[in-house]
């Protein structure tokens, strides 16, 4: 797959060019366009294809590597990582949340209301208001 065919950067966009590359690659990994193990073009190749500075693409690749999205193998190139680092982080966060939910005696539906309230508020975790309880027993 030729990355430069679908990866587009917009110099007039407020987001930095390296970040536009980074976000599009992450999106492609998450939607399956870039499968685990896929080899990415070299920094120089992609920079040339997109008509960007080599350092711009290098920064995008470096940040992707630091986030665990890609891995660089010496002399072989840069590849999409075999596992999505978000999977492990989110699984651990979900398990910790379920532990807390059970300790305070809430049921699945009430726990979901807290998650929905947090997402809907767009706020950080310390400013989420408790959703109204629809049951007094806590079990649902």
Image (tube, helix red, strand yellow):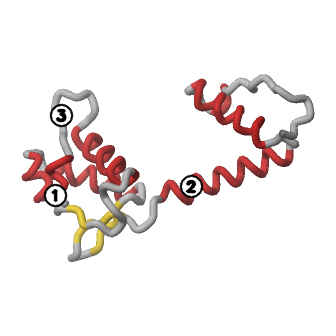
Which residue position is annotated with label 2? 89
Q: Earlier in the sequence, mark 3 or mark 1?
A: 1
Q: CA distance from mark 3 to mark 1?
A: 19 Å
For the C terminus, the image quarter is top right
Judging depth in this view, the residue of 31 and 117 nearest the camera is 31
Left or right of 138? Residue 41 is left
Instruction: Find numbered disc 1 in the image and state the secondary structure of the residue it sits on.
Output: loop
Residue located 14% across and 55% down the image: 46
The image quarter in which residue 138 lies: top right
Residue located 91% across and 29% down the image: 136
Q: CA distance from mark 3 to mark 2?
A: 31 Å
Which residue position is annotated with label 1? 2
Residue 135: x %, y % from top left: 87, 29
Instruction: Find numbered disc 2 in the image and state the secondary structure of the residue it sits on.
Output: helix
Mark 3 or 1: in front is: 1
- How packed mark 2 is, by other alpha carbons closer than 10 Å (few <14, some 14-19, many 20 or more), is few
Q: CA distance from mark 1 to mark 2?
A: 30 Å
The image quarter in which residue 17 lies: top left
Residue located 26% across and 27% down the image: 14
Residue 86: x %, y % from top left: 50, 54
């Amino acid at each position: 797959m030729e990355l430069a065919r679908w990866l587009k950067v917009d110099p007039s966009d407020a987001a930095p060019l390296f970040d536009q590359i980074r976000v599009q690659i992450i999106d492609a990994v998450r939607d399956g366009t870039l499968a685990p193990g896929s080899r990415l073009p070299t920094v120089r190749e992609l920079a040339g294809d997109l008509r960007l500075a080599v350092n711009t693409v290098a920064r995008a690749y470096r940040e992707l590597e630091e986030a665990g999205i890609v891995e660089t193998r010496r002399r072989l190139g840069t590849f999409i990582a075999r596992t999505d680092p978000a999977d492990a982080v989110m699984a651990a966060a979900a398990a910790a949340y379920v532990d807390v939910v059970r300790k305070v005696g809430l049921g699945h539906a009430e726990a979901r209301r807290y998650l929905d309230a947090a997402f809907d508020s767009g706020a950080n975790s310390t400013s989420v208001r408790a959703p109204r309880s629809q049951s007094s027993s806590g079990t649902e």
